[in-house]
Image (spheres, rainbow, N blue to C red):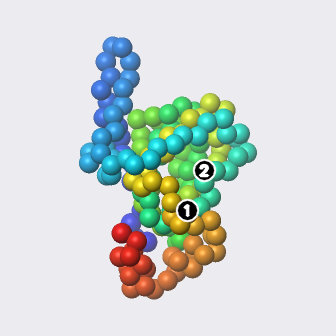
Amino acid sequence: MTQKPYAIQHAQDCGDERGNMHVLSAGKELPFAVKRAFYMQRSTDTAVRGNHANLYATLAFVCLCGTCRLSIDDGGQIYNLTLGDPAQTVIVQPRTWKKLDHFSADCILLVLSDRLYEEDDILKDYDAFVRLCAAPHTERAERNKKAF
């Protein structure tokens, strides 16, 4: 991949003397309308979460409290990001392998998705993911047309 499979967006800061308020709006800071949201908390520093690819869903990760590491693998390169700024959102494209680890004790990680949960969206076999990424460009493009 020549382009990074993720983008970093900054939430709109609407805070005042009463405190911080960060806003994520569809079509502005988020490139999609949110159809599903979930959050993780109380993960241990040795826990590994994710460790799969979403074939169709675009995800946005916001670390509301504490820190954790997000590893993004596009089949050719692995990008390791430390999340810890609640004003920062990492948007991750479909067909990327994601792994979360190194959670601080106070970590609360919010994940937003442009799709509802579907079991066939999740690829848990890393070797199959690598094979998918290695497929000829035209074959991948044909699968992408069917996926979107």
| Residue ID at (58%, 47%) | 69
**Nearest the eye: 112 or 99:** 112
Give the residue type that dot 1 points to: Glu
Instruction: Give percent across and percent down for residue 89.
Output: 42, 44
**Residue in the foreground of this view, choosing between 114 and 23:** 114
Question: Residue 101 at x, y = what percent?
Answer: 64, 48
> Residue at the location (40% across, 49% down)?
35
Q: Residue 7: horizontal and vertical position, in percent? A: 39, 53
| Mark seen at residue 119 | 1
Alpha-carbon distance for marks 2 and 1? 20 Å
Confirm or deny contact between disc 2 and disc 1 (CB under 8 A): no
The residue carrying mark 2 is: 100
Is residue 79 visible in the rendered image? The answer is no
Q: Is residue 81 visible?
A: yes
Q: Residue furthest left?
A: 27
Left-right relation of 131 to 141: right
Q: Does residue 142 sit above or below 90 in this rendering?
A: below
Q: Quadrant of residue 82?
A: top right
- Residue 66: image tag: none
Q: Residue at x 26, y 45 (%)?
A: 28
Q: Residues within 10 Å of mark 2 (few under 14, many from 20)?
A: many
Q: Residue furthest right?
A: 46
Query: How many residues crowd around disc 1 within 10 Å: few (fewer than 14), some, or many (20 or more)?
Result: few
